[in-house]
Amino acid sequence: EDQVTQSPEALRLQEGESSSLNCSYTVSGLRGLFWYRQDPGKGPEFLFTLYSAGEEKEKERLKATLTKKESFLHITAPKPEDSATYLCAVHDSKLTFGKGITLSVRP
Amino acid sequence: DADVTQTPRNRITKTGKRIMLECSQTKGHDRMYWYRQDPGLGLRLIYYSFDVKDINKGEISDGYSVSRQAQAKFSLSLESAIPNQTALYFCATSLGPGEKLFFGSGTQLSVL
């Protein structure tokens, strides 16, 4: 059975303290891995799509990377406005979401 | 205006009542989806539609039905609501297979 596991479940950082969020997956044939950001009371908002191992994408303080078994969302020098839940989703024959990682960044 | 609009934003209903959640989109996408989100469970697919004449069950379709009234409109119905259908419901659209999803702001449904 396809699985998508995100860790840790929650992460608290001090402003400026860089860290990484993990998404590990077991699927038979990866067609794409997605990262979304979700703010409280809102729907998920697309961040990145990665298609093959070794691929990297960046947007402001965020950088997503992909290997054959996992993806990392690296957050460099985070700010309080980066506080949100980050969702990972894996597409093979269907789209499977992880449970999300709640990030809190303290000023 | 939002590209994907859901109504209502919040709804409280009683067990056994019929309820409809509505979704409309201005993105011009053929593909539309209904998901529910529960704490600790993540997003789960209820139904999806690839065009007006195409309706498909997702992983948790029992107790739900849908109607695709037009390319832009996709509604979700609970024929007889039960408390374990209390959840946050999202409508989403996509341009094509494997493409990113665009989500509405969600409907928080509480079934008492």
Image (cartoon, coloured by chain):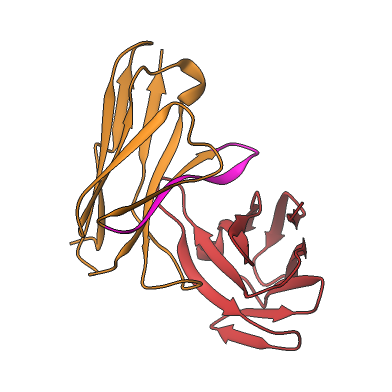
Tell me where residue B45 appears, x and y as whole percent.
Answer: 50, 46
Asked if the magenta segment contains residue B40, the reply would be: yes
Please name the predominant secondary structure of the magenta segment in the image: strand
Total count of labels: 0
Q: Residue furthest right?
A: A69
Location of residue A55 in the rendering, given as x and y in whole percent from the top left corner: 69, 88
Question: Is A2 placed above or below A28 here?
Answer: above
Which colour represents chain A? red
Residue farthest toward the front in the current orientation of the protein: B53
Which of the 4 image quadrants contains residue B27? bottom left
Residue pictured at 56% horizontal, 58% vertical: A83
Residue A36 seen from this side: yes
Question: Is A107 one of the magenta-colored residues?
Answer: no
Residue A107 visible (yes or no): no
Whether residue B87 is situated above or below residue A13 in the rendered picture: above
Start-end of magenta stretch: B38-51
Left or right relative to B67: residue A45: right
Looking at the image, is B81 positioned above or below residue A24?
above
Question: In percent of the image, x 27 and y 55: which residue is there?
Answer: B53
Which of these two is toward me, A106 or B37?
Answer: B37
Give the quarter of the image for residue B106: top left
Q: Quadrant of the C terminus of chain A?
A: bottom right
For image coordinates 61% across by 62% down, the residue present is A89
Q: Nearer the viewer, residue B65 or A42?
A: B65
Task: Give how far across and how far down residue B55 sits, in percent.
Answer: 36, 49
Which tint was used for chain B?
orange
Task: Give x and y (percent) for residue A65.
Answer: 71, 80
Q: Residue at x 72, y 72 (%)?
A: A29
